[in-house]
């Protein structure tokens, strides 16, 4: 998989997969990588092929320092309906374990990207689709969007989707979603923290664009420090979190972009970021 140069105009693709077989579209829009689930006829289900393409895309994005932010979007009326159930009937134990392990790698891949990831939710996100939204760093949803973990309705509890869900949603609400499988409207999802912003459908791209512009204007080095620290420290005891935060912030302060940012502020000028990779304390 190859990336395109940042100076390329328009919405050129990050790679050139065969159009008739790819379930994922990859584009560069300025400093943002747009990943678009492109199998609307199957409600953008996370088939083995879709998961494989997502894994490859995340590897390419991780290596491209010119990309500052990632947007995860989808075609059609449904964002993602979860796993492709046509691939899940009558499989072996090893096949199920392989599928759920691959899906887990994708979810962790989004969390471990140095770039922040924004989910653009235009429709329903269910089961592993809800998991995918919860695994992103920010979620922007249309008023028509909805979220659900309805595995109980087919005898398959949404255990893997539960993992990121309980890290962004209060426990009682997460348990309600998992036990009942009901669809939670976007406005309600915003109230308990699954969604950052809810807008009319026609304003969805503009709302995503505001986050993209804000993130892309900052130092990629600083964003990398911040995103990794957030997820590494969020569940530690306070004293342990502080101890690690001191080491991370010390490394951050020594980085070129931190020194440039401090100098630019004192000198009342715009900073000139070099976006070098963050070096974390061991």
Image (spheres, rainbow, N blue to C red):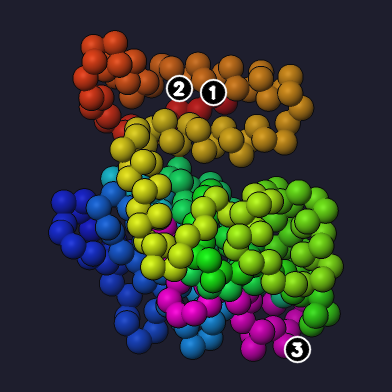
The correct choice, above or below, for 69 with respect to 18 in the image is above
Q: Is residue 78 magenta?
A: yes
Horizontal relation, residue 185 to residue 33: left or right: right
Q: Element at badge 3?
A: loop
Residue reaching furthest to the top: 266
Part of the protein shown in magenta = 71-95
Is residue 75 shown left or right of residue 236? left
Residue linked to disc 2: 252
Residue 91, percent from left and from top = 73, 84
Q: Secondary structure at mark 2?
A: helix
Q: Which residue is mark 1?
A: 248
- Count neighbours of disc 3 (C-alpha within 10 A) and say few if under 14, some if 14 to 19, many if 20 or more: few
Kindly tell me whether residue 75 is visible in this rendering.
Answer: yes
Q: Is residue 200 left or right of residue 47?
A: left
Marks counted in the figure total 3
Say which of marks 1 and 3 sits in front.
Answer: 1
Q: What residue is shown at x 68% (from left), y 66% (from top)?
A: 184
Which residue shows up at 52% across the image and 38% down it? 227
Q: Which mark is residue 274?
A: none
Viewer-closest of 184 and 165: 184
- Does the magenta run of residues contain 42? no
Residue drawn at the location 23% of the way across and 64% of the way down: 11
Q: Residue at x 57, y 32 (%)?
A: 229
**Residue 134 found in image quarter:** bottom right
Q: What residue is pinned by disc 3? A: 90
Q: CA gap, disc 1 to disc 3?
A: 47 Å
Relative height, residue 66 to residue 152 (above, below): above
Relative depth, front residue between 157 and 147: 147
Quadrant position of the C terminus in the picture:
top right
Relative to residue 89, is residue 123 depicted above or below?
Answer: above
């Amino acid at each position: 998989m190859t990336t395109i140069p940042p100076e390329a105009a328009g919405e050129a693709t990050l790679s050139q997969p065969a159009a008739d077989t790819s379930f994922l579209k990859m584009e560069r829009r300025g400093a943002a990588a747009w990943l678009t689930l492109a199998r609307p006829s199957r409600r953008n289900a996370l088939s083995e092929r879709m998961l494989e393409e997502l894994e490859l895309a995340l590897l390419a994005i991780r290596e491209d320092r010119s990309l500052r932010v990632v947007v995860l979007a989808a075609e059609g009326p449904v964002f993602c309906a979860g796993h492709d159930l046509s691939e899940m009937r009558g499989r072996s134990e090893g096949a199920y374990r392989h599928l759920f392990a691959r899906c887990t790698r994708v979810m962790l891949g989004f969390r471990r990207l140095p770039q922040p990831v924004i989910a653009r939710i235009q429709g329903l996100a269910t089961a592993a689709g809800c998991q995918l939204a919860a695994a992103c760093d920010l979620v922007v949803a249309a008023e028509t969007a909805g979220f659900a973990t309805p595995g109980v309705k087919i005898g398959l509890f949404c255990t893997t989707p539960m993992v990121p869900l309980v890290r962004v949603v209060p426990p009682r609400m997460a348990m309600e979603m998992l036990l009942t499988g009901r669809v939670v409207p976007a406005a309600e999802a915003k109230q308990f923290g699954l969604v950052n912003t809810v807008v009319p459908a026609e304003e969805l791209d503009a709302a995503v664009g505001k986050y993209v512009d804000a993130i892309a204007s900052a130092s990629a080095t600083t964003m990398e420090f911040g995103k990794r620290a957030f997820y590494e420290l969020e569940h530690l005891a306070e004293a342990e979190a502080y101890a690690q935060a001191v080491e991370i912030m010390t490394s951050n302060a020594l980085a070129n972009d931190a020194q440039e940012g401090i100098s630019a502020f004192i000198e009342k000028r715009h900073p000139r970021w070099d976006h070098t990779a963050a070096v974390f304390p061991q």
